[in-house]
Image (cartoon, grey):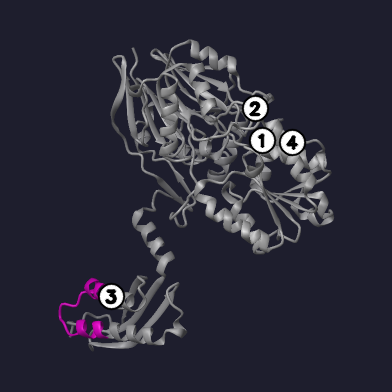
Amino acid sequence: MSNVKIIPLGGVRENSKSLYVVEVDTQIFVLDCGLMFPEGELYGIDAVIPDFTYLKQNKERIAGVFLSHGHEDAIGALPYFIDEFNVPVFGSELTIELARLQVESVIGKGNFSDYHVVDSSLAIDFGEVKVHFFQVTHTIPDAMGISIETLEGHVVYTGNFKFDQSADGPYRTNLNHISDIGKERVLALLSSSLGAESLEENAPDKRVQSVVTEIFQDAPTRIIVAAVQSNLLRIQQIINAAHATNRKVFISSSKSQDIINVAIDLGKLTLPKKDILQSISDLEKFHDDETVILETGSSGEPIKALREMATNQHPNIGIRNEDTVFIATNPSVAMEVEVAECENLIYRSGGEVVKLSNQIKASGHATPNDLQLMMNLLHPEYFIPVQGEYRVLAAHARLAHETGIPHEHIFTLSNGDVVEYKKGKMHSTGTVPADNTLVDGIGIGDVGNIVLRDRRLLSNDGIFVAVVTIDRRKQKIVANPHIVTRGFVFVKANYDLINESTTIVEKVIQQNLKHNDFDWGSIKSEIRNELSDYLFKETKRRPIILPVIMEVNQRRWYDK
């Protein structure tokens, strides 16, 4: 008998940052190691990664990291993980090469080499535990689900998937393998929930290819395509459509070029003609109706780059009259307002926007029917919906119950929740640390709520700095207060406000200079409070207030 625990450290009640721990007796198996790009009020943050605290406390027990596919929601946190843990990493050929590229971009080449390429025919033996991979369909080749075979049965993690009966090659799902696993005991299924609320079935990718080609055929001049850099299926469709319409593809991002080169070298991305990909520096050598510009943006998000193009702030491209801007990605809900604003700017620049999502349902995520088919192939005893906000996890849980899984066998978890199978039953047993870890430049986890609060305040009401020089021995102000503001008010139009603020600072300083118990902290606090009350009364704004007090004659005032 084995003791089995399942712990999500990321990837539940959120759309990315997948990291799931499956603990079998003394061994820990890490499924995916993804990041999340910041949204909302995470000002200045580059990425959000899972909390590794629990894994640090049990680092000697980690058997390895097992990757489902090569998107950043599955591999993006790997550089930060292997900086802490020296454990092997397993994945398909393309996934491993993209993971290597991701790691080297953060920690450099030659610092880690313990990668292992696997395929669906292999079973990795860890004593009483075996790890299997099975091929699934997603928007990137070589995506695979993962099955951890224990003495109590299989714990299966689907990764991101969908079913497409017309998919072929490295995109084709191995239904026989999934069915074979389902013929054995499946203790628990962790299944992606991102499409659980979909009201429409996904179109076959071959039909999507036809729609993309039709869009290219209708474009009168240049085509600018916004796509996610790791969505290699969409990039393949763009290349095929460009070839069919006698156009060349110009890749704007160097990182996208690296990913595409890896895929080409491994035979996962095919080129109809060798010269179909061109350098962005050669764009002016071709007529507008011969060009397709592929823009993936920074952090895999192309919408910001389109905005820069529309406002002539992009380093390479500006949107011109009659340009067709083809948005070939499905932005997240949090990006909807930004996308709408971007579309408006594109039209104002003379371009025309065509969105793939308005033409056809093209998604890499399983619909409700797909999700229930996966459950019926695997017949799990327990079910844990993962990957998605709470509403889609709840929708997925309802779908599971419809297939016959009892409510008490369905666990809708939060990050850090622990479910344990022991003595013939699975139940919740507690929690472990699973906060977000914020990456800002080279800093990992050193930005907390206080720093984010200050950044939010700066973005809302700006900063107000009051600089004054004093002489405590003579008990006087040597240099009158100097006020500096940024993002608060325009100084030249608010002389009265600035003058009164100067008077307030002088008054507080003079009052404190008269006291023998002069305290730096108290005087700064008093200046801050007095200014805060006055500025809010006059402007209804609360800028960050920084009093700066400098001293001349720094011999102690009592040293005579």
Q: The residue tagged with tag 1: helix, strand or loop?
A: helix
Point out the frontmost of discs 4 and 3: 4
Magenta stretch: residue 146 in it? no
The reply to whether residue 230 is visible in this rendering is yes
**Residue 413 place in picture, x, y as percent:** 36, 33
User: Which quadrant would residue 498 be assigned to in this image?
Assistant: bottom left
Spatial CA span between label 2 and label 3: 63 Å
Name which of mark 2 and mark 4 comes first in the sequence: 2
User: Where does label 2 land, which residue?
Assistant: 171
Query: Could you tell me the amino acid type at mark 4?
Result: Ser
3 relative position to 222: left or right: left
Query: Could you tell me the amino acid type at mark 2?
Result: Tyr
User: Where does label 1 land, which residue?
Assistant: 233
Residue segment shown in magenta: 507-530
User: Where does label 4 land, which residue?
Assistant: 210
Q: The residue tagged with tag 3: helix, strand or loop?
A: helix
**Residue 339 place in picture, x, y as percent:** 58, 53
